[in-house]
Image (cartoon, rainbow, N blue to C red):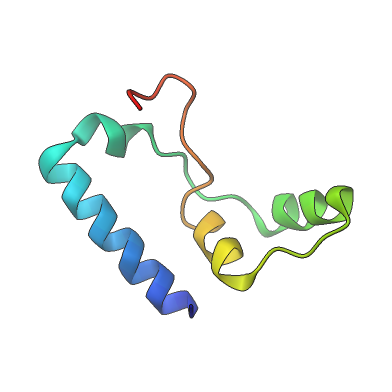
C-alpha cells in the first residue's frame, strides 16, 4: 500500500468516526515521529512494512482510555 493510499484510508476512517463515533476519533493518538519508529525498529531488530510505517506517521495508536 502506498503512502497516499494509507492517507486516503485514514481519511475515510476519520470521516466515519467523526460521524458515528466521535469519541473514538478523539482517542486516536497523533503521529509517531520518524525517530521513534526507527528507534523501535532498532530495539526490535526488525523493519516495519512501509504501509505500517506510513500508518504510524498518521496515528500512533489510541489512548488507553478509549471506548474500544
Q: Residue 5, position in %: x, y?
A: 39, 76
- When the figure is inspected, residue 52 is found, relative to residue 67, above or below; the finding is below
26 or 50, nearer to the observer: 50
User: Is 10 placed left or right of 15 in the picture?
Assistant: right
Q: Residue 7, position in %: x, y?
A: 38, 68
Instruction: Give the quarter of the image for residue 37.
Output: bottom right
Q: Residue at x 51, y 41 (%)?
A: 61
48 or 30, nearer to the observer: 48
Residue ranking furthest to the top: 65
- When the figure is inspected, residue 44 is found, relative to residue 12, above or below; the finding is above
User: Is 40 placed left or right of 19 in the picture?
Assistant: right
Q: Residue at x 47, y 49 (%)?
A: 59
Q: Residue at x 72, y 49 (%)?
A: 36
Instruction: Give the quarter of the image for residue 68.
Output: top left
Q: How many marks?
A: 0
User: Is 26 placed left or right of 55 in the picture?
Assistant: left
Amino acid at each position: 500500500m502506498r503512502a497516499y493510499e494509507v492517507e486516503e484510508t485514514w481519511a475515510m476512517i476519520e470521516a466515519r468516526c467523526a460521524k458515528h463515533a466521535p469519541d473514538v476519533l478523539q482517542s486516536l493518538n497523533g503521529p509517531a515521529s520518524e525517530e521513534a519508529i526507527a528507534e523501535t525498529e532498532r530495539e526490535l531488530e526488525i523493519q516495519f512494512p512501509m504501509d505500517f510505517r506510513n500508518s504510524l506517521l498518521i496515528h500512533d495508536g489510541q489512548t488507553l482510555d478509549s471506548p474500544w
